[in-house]
Image (cartoon, rainbow, N blue to C red):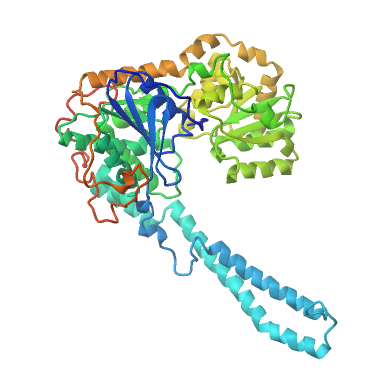
Amino acid sequence: MELGSGTAEAEAPTAGRRGRVVMLVCNGVTGDSRVQKTARSAAAAGWDVILLGRSPDGRPATWRIGGAQVRLLPVPTPLADPPRRTRRPFLALRPGTAAYRLQRAKARRDELRTRRAALLAGHPRGGPAAPPRDRVRDRARLALPRAAARFAVHWAGLRKRHLDHALRRRTAGTLADRVAVALWQRLLGVRCWRRLWPGLYDFELAYGRVVDALAPDLIHAHDFRMLGVGARAKIRAAAEGRTVRLVWDAHEYLPGVRPWENDPRWLPAHLAHEREYVPYADAAVTVSDTLAALLRRTHGLAADPAVVLNAPEAHTTGSGARIEGPGLRARCGIDAATPLVVYSGAAAPQRGLATMVEALPGLPGVHTALVVPKPAARYPAELRARAAELGVADRLHVLPYVPYDQVVPFLAEADAGAIPLHHWPNHEIALITKFFEYAHAGLPLVVSDVETMAATTLETGLGEVFRAQDTDDYVRAVRTVLADPRRYRAAPGRPGLLRRWTWEAQARTLDRIYTRLLDAAPHHAPQERHDPEGDGNADLCGGAREDRTAAGRPVRGQGTPGDGRRHRPARGGRGERRDDAVPR
């Protein structure tokens, strides 16, 4: 979820497999350290692990993380663009052509303006001056094209304004959107996501048959999109007489997520999707105690989900940990005596990176490094431009991710680690990955006053807290930790905390959950089945790809048991519940 862009070194598979675990994630795996560590540690504990992720370029790929196999699947997304999203007002330009059409009209207008200026100067083509009579004739000849060009600019501007207005209304939610959400929620209950956000079924079409063919004993579904894929696979397995256990790994609190798309249907649809399939989970895990309590209240669970922190692996944090290639300071081009504050993680406005840039003029001589997944992306480019306006561009360094098992030694070269998050519900309830990475790197922390991380920082003495989005208070906090870094590195209890904040401790929790669930279930040999019908979306050998919807085949999973608001156990698949995720 934070740093981590490479695969770990090869690790021999453990003999005596204990059962097949299929892990599901809706990203490309390489940037998700929690998913990588989960797969690697489960394989090392003797489970037969296959991790299915989404190919970022539409091509199948496979590799290994330790003893776990990773497969990336192509995920065609035609359902993500329903016809309603392409509709626009009569006068509005198409979104993909609006800027081009307006700019082209302006270019034509200004070209004619320049030609008229040349005629007025008497040099229509840069040669000798034209006779006065010719100048009058040429200017008259340009009058109509110039009028047409001015009209074209106004017309294109009008149509672009109509488009902009339509997009703003769509983002805010039109009356039709609000009526549609309310209507489908009333008619279909938790099944309403099929109408509000059918794109969720694109993942089913890409993953479903692959999961069925792998015949897992246990499915570990990471986050809310994959929960439905895992639950539907469990239902189908039960219909065939196989028992499959489902573990739901809730990385975030969905009601507090900032919608990934500017569409008022996105959040209600995803909330309904999650509510429909949570009852199929035999166990749930999440990232903090606060989030565990929220999930229990939201979904009526019998007990809090188990907490599995996204902490670094012990072998990546000790004195023997090494990085490949240049270190953090070498990439910034600074020496060991230069004060350096680092941020590692996703780059987005709500992450508070602008506060770090705005603070640089108030921190003379201090450099800031932002270690982000895509340094050339739009938002990091905006931050660099702002640093240039402030005259501090030479002290801002935007760097790419490093492999997850090199993160801690890489960050350890800094003098402080910053977490300047804004106040969003999900920011308030978790200890995020970089918190543990900074702690293991021995960095004093500079944390905004988001609830859980601020409280933990103050209780442990690991750093200073500042008011979110308050540049002056951030400057104060940075100056404080840089003035006496030893005070924070020698915080009471740090060694004990760091021992608990390791992935090995978290992996033992997951292993206990897997073991308990499968001890209660009949064991099936992990033998792959081969569907005679086949599915292009599941082709891992580079063969021709086929969209099942376009082929007119039925959509799998619709009309299955559990589609309604009340859930009945699928025969053979819901026999015993574990109190990690049991609805009351």
User: Does residue 111 sit above or below 184 in this rendering?
Assistant: below
Evaluate whether residue 287 shows in this view: no
Indicate the position of residue 59 as horizontal and vertical percent values: 42, 45
Evaluate whether residue 501 shows in this view: yes
| Nearer to us in this view, 377 or 20 | 20
Corner quadrant of residue 385: top right
* Extreme residue toward the right, this view: 128
Q: Is residue 146 left or right of residue 582?
A: right
| Nearer to us in this view, 546 or 302 | 546
Indicate the position of residue 71 as horizontal and vertical percent values: 38, 36
Number of on-image labels? 0
User: Does residue 147 sit above or below 14 in this rendering?
Assistant: below
Q: Is residue 454 left or right of residue 227?
A: right
| Nearer to us in this view, 417 or 267 | 417
Q: Residue at x 25, y 38 (%)?
A: 232
Q: Is residue 259 left or right of residue 466?
A: left
Corner quadrant of residue 364: top right
Indicate the position of residue 74 as horizontal and vertical percent values: 38, 45
Quarter of the picture containing the C terminus is top left
Indicate the position of residue 75 as horizontal and vertical percent values: 37, 46
